[in-house]
Image (tube, rainbow, N blue to C red):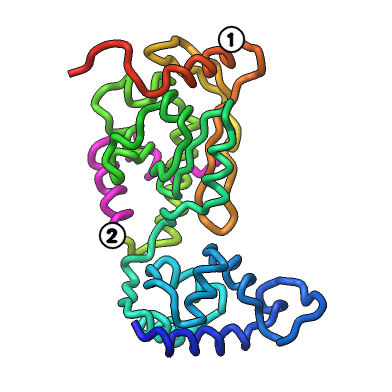
């Protein structure tokens, strides 16, 4: 990593991009025609401190995901993008391009503050990438699962060997299935060369007739609100609404499970907050 050359490259690239180029207002008291550091950081979905340190030649080694975000924010050409990766000591691999797995701190803060609602964050392949404590108590302890295949909801829905565990006690839902497959279809379209996505689709087609039928049918529908009954092994049936909110620029969705205040379902969620992820029966 050539810190000094990288810093010079970032500053010169930033100076060439105007606010109008990226859809930002010109504002007042702008000393230079280019973007401000905080604007680049905002567009790249990284912290201002991290970007500032890179421009000052004292930053830590940026990840490929951070570099990709900066390249988009600065509207770099393919040659300039390659130069950015070279200066940072990273090799750009087109096949590595894929769903965003890093969750913004603002999104993490949001789901943590939803004390009376269970919330998870999923990427465009329906892999769970973040969750709050109540979601772990309601669905399962995601921290105990392998980060890859085992946390993927669409893989669990179609391939889990236990029908009851497959749907977290919600039973089969055609609306969920079509929505999940639609998100996966968008991810494959956006990242056609991603090996992970190719392998996931191939595994689902080979292992599930239901998925194969949906995939071949080209159905496309995304529902942002559903109502389901979750049959929890400790507290019984819980009637919940869940809403799907999209995180702008991240291709991630926040799924929030809620219940009417003072309803039986709400009281069940309150009980789950106390129980947490513990199990009342011994497991082997």
Q: Which quadrant would the N terminus be assigned to in this image?
A: bottom left
Q: Earlier in the sequence, mark 2 or mark 1?
A: 2
**Which residue is found at the position 32% from the left and 76% from the top?**
90
Which residue is denoted by mark 2 in the rendering?
Answer: 195
Q: Position of residue 226 (x, y in %)?
A: 57, 28
Q: Position of residue 177 (x, y in %)?
A: 44, 34
For the residue pair 141 and 219, the one nearer the viewer reads as 141
Nearer mark to the viewer, of 2 and 1: 1
Quick one: which residue is furthest to the left in this view?
A: 284
Label 1 near label 2: C-beta < 8 Å? no
Q: Quadrant of residue 44?
A: bottom right
Q: Is residue 158 left or right of residue 217?
A: left
Q: Position of residue 100 (x, y in %)?
A: 44, 56
Per the rendered image, the range of residues in magenta is 196-223
Which residue is denoted by mark 1 in the rendering?
Answer: 264
Location of residue 17 with respect to 272 vertically, above or below? below
Magenta-span inclusion, residue 155: no
Neighbours of disc 2 within 10 Å: few (<14), some (14-19), many (20+): few
């Amino acid at each position: 990593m050539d810190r000094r050359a990288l810093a010079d490259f970032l500053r010169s690239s930033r100076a060439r991009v105007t606010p109008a180029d990226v859809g930002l207002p010109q504002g007042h008291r702008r000393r230079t025609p280019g973007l401000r550091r905080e604007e680049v950081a905002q567009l790249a979905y990284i912290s201002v401190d991290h970007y500032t340190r890179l421009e000052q030649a004292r930053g830590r080694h940026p990840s490929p995901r951070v570099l990709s975000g900066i390249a988009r924010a600065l509207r770099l050409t393919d040659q300039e993008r390659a130069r950015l990766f070279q200066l940072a000591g990273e090799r750009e691999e087109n096949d590595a391009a894929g769903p965003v797995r890093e969750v913004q701190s603002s999104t993490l803060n949001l789901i943590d503050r939803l004390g009376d609602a269970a919330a998870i964050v999923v990427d465009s392949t329906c892999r769970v990438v973040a969750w709050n404590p109540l979601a772990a108590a309601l669905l399962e302890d995601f921290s105990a699962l392998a980060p890859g295949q085992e946390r993927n909801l669409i893989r669990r829905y179609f391939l889990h060997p236990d029908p009851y565990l497959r749907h977290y006690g919600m039973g089969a839902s055609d609306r969920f299935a079509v929505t999940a497959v639609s998100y996966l279809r968008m991810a494959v379209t956006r990242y056609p060369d991603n090996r992970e996505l190719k392998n996931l689709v191939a595994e689902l087609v080979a292992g599930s007739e239901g998925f194969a039928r949906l995939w071949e049918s080209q159905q496309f529908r995304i529902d942002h609100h559903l109502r389901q009954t979750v049959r929890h092994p400790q507290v019984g049936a819980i009637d919940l609404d869940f809403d799907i909110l999209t995180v702008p620029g991240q291709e991630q969705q926040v799924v929030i499970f809620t219940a009417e205040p003072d309803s039986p379902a709400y009281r069940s969620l309150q009980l789950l907050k106390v129980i947490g992820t513990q199990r009342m029966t011994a497991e082997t």
